[in-house]
Image (spheres, rainbow, N blue to C red):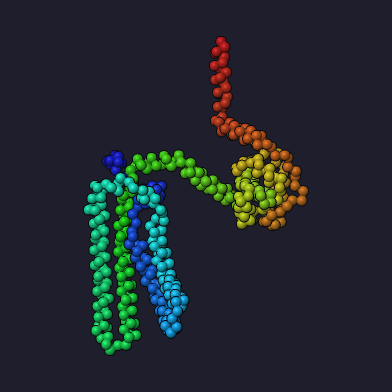
Amino acid sequence: MAGEPAGEKTEKATPQRMKKLRKEGALQRSQDVSAWLGVGAAAVMMPAAIGNAKRVGEEQFRSLGDIVADPTADRAVRFLSDGLGSVLVSLAPVLAVVVVAAIVANVAQGGLHIATKKLKPTFKQFNLVQGIKKTFGAQALWQGLKALLKTVVIGVVLYTAIQGLVPVLMTAGGLSLSTIIGVGSGGVQKLVVWAVAAGLVLAAADLFVIMKRNRKQTRMTKKEISDENKQSEGDPHIKGQRRARQMAMSRNRMIANVADADVVVVNPTHVAVALRYTPGQGAPKVVATGKGAVATRIREMATEHRVPMVQDIPLARAIHAMCRVDDEIPEELFTAVAQVLAFVMALKRRGASAGQHTMATPTPVPPTPTAAERARRRRAARVASRASARPPGHEDSTSGTHAGSTGRETR
C-alpha cells in the first residue's frame, strides 16, 4: 500500500522461508510441551511399572535368602546383574513412552531438524547489545512470568493434595500399614495427575506465546516475497516440481476422458489408445494414449465405465506412435479404425460390448512413418490450422497488395 514504508514486514512468511528457518533452527519451540508431555506419559505408565518392579523386588528378596545362606562371589554377582536387568526391564516401557512423547511434541512443532548452523560460532553470539536485549526483553519477561506461574500452580497443587492427606496421617496410629500405603499412594497419584494437568495448561499457554512470536519475527516485506518468487521461478528443482505437477494433472484429465470414449484399442498390456468418434465432426479423435502404467490406468478406467476394448497390436502401436491426445486419426489408418468402430457397434447392438475383444480378421496396418515424417506432418497440420483460422479474404487482400506494390516498383 502507498501508506506503508517500503521495508516494513507486513506479509506472512512463505513456505520456502519457513522451511529454511526450520532447517537453520531459527524458530523457537516450547520446551515445556515436550517436558510435560513426557511427564504425563511417564505418569500414565508408572502404575504398571511400579507393579512390575514390586513383583521383581519380591522375587529378588526371596532369592536373597539363598545367597545369605550360601554366599559365593558368583552368586552375588549373578544376583546383582539379575536385579539390574529387572530394574531396566521395569523402567524400559516408561523411558520408551517418554522418548516417543518428546518426539511427537517436536514433530508437532515443525518436525525434527538438526540445526548444524547453530553449532557454528558467530559474532551475534558475542554481541553485548543483543545479549542485553534478550536478558531484559519481552522474551525474558515471559520466561520469568512463566517460572512464577509454574511455582504458584505447582505450589497450589501440592498444598491441596497434602491438605487432603493430613487428616489421614493424623489418625495413622489406628490404621493398618496396607491402609496407610493405599491412602498415601492414592494421594500421590492425585498429586501427579493435578500437577501434570496444570503443567500441560501452562505448556499450551507457552506454545501459544511462542507461535505468536514466531509469526511476528518471520514476517517478510513485499520486496522479499517478490525476490523469493523470482528466485523460485528460476530454480531448476522448483521448475521440475511444477512441470511434474502439470504433467500429472494433464495425465489425470486424459485418463478421465476415457469414460467418454467409444473404444479402447489395446496392445493388449503395454499400449492403450482411447478413441472417440462423433459423426459429422471429422475423423475419430484420440482422447487418451499411453504406455506402461498409463496404459494400465486407461484399461482400468475403460473397465470401470464399460468402454469396449479391442485387441489389435499393430493398430494400437501405430496410433500411439503417430498421434497425440486430441489428434485426428491419420488418413492411412482410416480403414483399420473404421473396421474397429464397426466391430464395436455390432457388439453394442448385441449388448456385449463391455470387456476386451479380438476381431477375427483385422485390417492390415501400413508401416508406421519415421519420427522425422511424423514431425513434418505435425508442422504441416499446424500451418493448415493457422491458415484456416485467418479471416476470409485476408490472404487475397494481402496478395493483392503485394502485387500492386510489385507493379509500381516495375513501373
279 on left or right of 190? right
Q: At x 24% / y 47%, what residue is drawn?
A: 129
167 on left or right of 224? left
Instruction: Using the rendered view, name the quadrant where residue 68 is placed.
Output: bottom left
Residue at the front extreme of this rendering: 72
Q: At x 31% / y 54%, what residue is drawn?
A: 212
The C terminus sits in image quarter: top right
Please provide percent x and percent y for residue 293: 61, 51
Q: At x 38% / y 40%, what residue is drawn?
A: 227
In the image shown, does 219 or 406 lie closer to the viewer? 219
69 on left or right of 314? left
In the image shown, does 209 or 104 lie closer to the viewer? 104
Please provide percent x and percent y for residue 342: 71, 48
Please provide percent x and percent y for residue 205: 30, 61
Residue at the right extreme of this rendering: 361
Q: Is residue 163 above or below residue 173?
A: above
Q: Is residue 320 above or below residue 307?
A: above
The answer to whether residue 52 is seen in the rendering is no
Q: At x 34% / y 56%, what residue is drawn?
A: 29
In the image shown, does 252 or 134 lie closer to the viewer? 134
Number of marks in picture: 0
Please provide percent x and percent y for residue 45: 40, 72
